[in-house]
Amino acid sequence: MHKKDGRRIAAVAVAAVAMITGGTAMTLSERGVSERGMSERGVSERGAGPQASEDRRPRTPAGGGQTAEAVRKILAAANLAVPHGWRPADIREERHDEVPVTVVRYERDGRRSLGGEHVSAVVADDGTLLGYTRLVADTPPARLSEERARQAALGWLRSYVPEYAQGLRVQWVDRHDERVRTPDGRERVVSGMKVKAHHTSGRYAWVIVDGGGRIVTYERDVRWDGAAGRRGTEMWLHDSWIAAREGTGPQPGAPYAVA
């Protein structure tokens, strides 16, 4: 075969390849680059995928916050027990004004259900209990007189935080109701007598006691925003406020804090 004929055959072969591939024939080196590019593009396209929706619920503390077990012990020291068998449903690191806190929520089945029964606590990194609530449907209804409610609240405060209690002056005592949803979907009222006090620090505290004299709710070091006519401190014990904070519920009106 002549060299000229060989060149013609090679040209025909190249043209045939170009027709089969639908374009210009590639050298081996060009083909290798193209295949690597296609492979990288394939990985990129698979990796893009649909964007996950944002979960605004904070995660389990990763820093210097309290653990759920540590919070249980702090509550036990205050004679504020979590019902037997209830498990942590949410643990989050937040702030109580300028104070870093851990908020732990316990529920019957360990799954968070805003509006349902729960025991929640707000604890500072130094172990100070800043908030507690026990919203359980079988709570004995409010039936204590104002004086007995005052005695029960102050007696508990003096036994648990005696130095802090010395700076408190009771402002008023009145009935307070909260509503919770039971596991079967019914709404129940949890009632108690609220004893509100002003502290020498300029902030507020209160204790709510049930019909048997047990503590339903306790909050301290709460700031009032006089200019806005509403609470200034965050409300980690209140489900409607939490829902507004997370963008799943409406913004509550005064006297609730802005979420």
Image: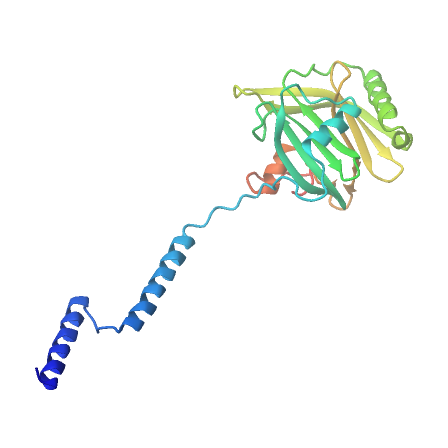
Pick the front one: 25 or 133: 25
Pick the front one: 91 or 152: 91
Above-or-below relation of 198 to 157:
below
Q: Quadrant of residue 168?
A: top right
Looking at the image, residue 214 sits to the left or right of residue 56; the answer is: right
Q: Quadrant of residue 55?
A: top right
Looking at the image, residue 37 sits to the left or right of residue 257; the answer is: left
Q: Residue 9: x percent and y percent?
A: 11, 78
Q: Quadrant of residue 179?
A: top right
Q: Residue 3: x percent and y percent?
A: 12, 85
Above-or-below relation of 72 to 29:
above
Q: Residue 16: x percent and y percent?
A: 13, 71
Pick the front one: 144 or 76: 76
How many marks are shown on the rendered structure? 0
Q: Residue 206: x percent and y percent?
A: 79, 29
In what quadrant of the picture does the C terminus appear?
A: top right
Can residue 64 be spotted in the picture? yes
What residue sits 86% from the left and 40% below the top?
202
Residue extending farthest to the front is: 1
Above-or-below relation of 52 to 15:
above
Looking at the image, residue 11 sits to the left or right of residue 54; the answer is: left
What residue sits 87% from the left and 40% below the top?
201
Pick the front one: 148 or 131: 131
What residue sits 68% from the left and 32% below the top?
68
In what quadrant of the picture does the N terminus appear?
A: bottom left
